[in-house]
Amino acid sequence: MADFAHQLAHLFHTHLYLALAAGGLMEGETVVVLAGFAAHQGHASWWGVTLFAAAVNACVDQAWFLLGRWRGPALAARFPGLGRRIAELAPRIHAHRHGLVFGLRFSYGLRVAGPVALAMAGMRLREFALLNLPAALVWAAIFSGIGYAFGLAALQLLDRVRPYEPIILGAGLALGLTAWWMARRR
């Protein structure tokens, strides 16, 4: 089990930027924190990790915005959860749209709905783009900075936890499989 964890860590370090790109397609805070930690360990430049994560996430959010402009109502109808999140945002969009571009980036579950809702509300593409890039930079700097700053503390914690690694990985796998099984049953 410890060998598997070592191989996984090696895979992440050798394909760091690919992992950042894949994490950007999801709500990728965890990947960016891990990339910041990898930068702390000397596997990459912190600036490189931060700028790459910002660029990927800005492009992904821009794509969601464009998709919302093009097919927003159809997406909301097709995915009821997305439609509910868009409806939650609708009353605040016009009054707070600039703050929403920043704030939605830090709101779990609204990273997709936010750009789609802003596009559906008629926000101009240029306006979104001019706010989206600095928001992505701030977001990437914060999360990669957390990984970088807490790298030493994480190393010390990992040294203490290392003897229990197989148990922790096994428990995590068991919990994940149980959650998956329960979700499938529902």
Image (tube, rainbow, N blue to C red):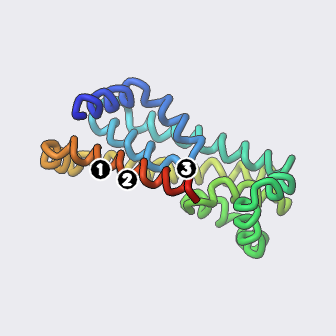
The residue carrying pointer 2 sits among few (fewer than 14), some (14 to 19) or many (20 or more) residues within 10 Å by Cα, namely few
The residue under the point 22% across, 34% down is 2
The residue carrying pointer 1 sits among few (fewer than 14), some (14 to 19) or many (20 or more) residues within 10 Å by Cα, namely few
Distance, label 3 to label 2, CA atoms, is 21 Å
Question: On the image, numbered disc 1 is attached to which residue?
Answer: 171
User: Which of the two labelled residues, at mark 3 and mark 1, occupies the earlier sequence position?
Assistant: 3
Distance, label 2 to label 1, CA atoms, is 6 Å
**Residue 105 picture quarter:** bottom right
Residue 146 visible: yes
Amino acid carrying mark 2 in the image? Leu
The residue under the point 49% across, 50% down is 180
The residue under the point 39% across, 39% down is 35
In the figure, 102 relative to 126: above or below?
below
Is there CB contact under 8 Å for labels 3 and 1?
Answer: no
In the figure, 36 relative to 143: above or below?
above
Query: Where is residue 65 shown, x and y percent of the image?
Result: 75, 49
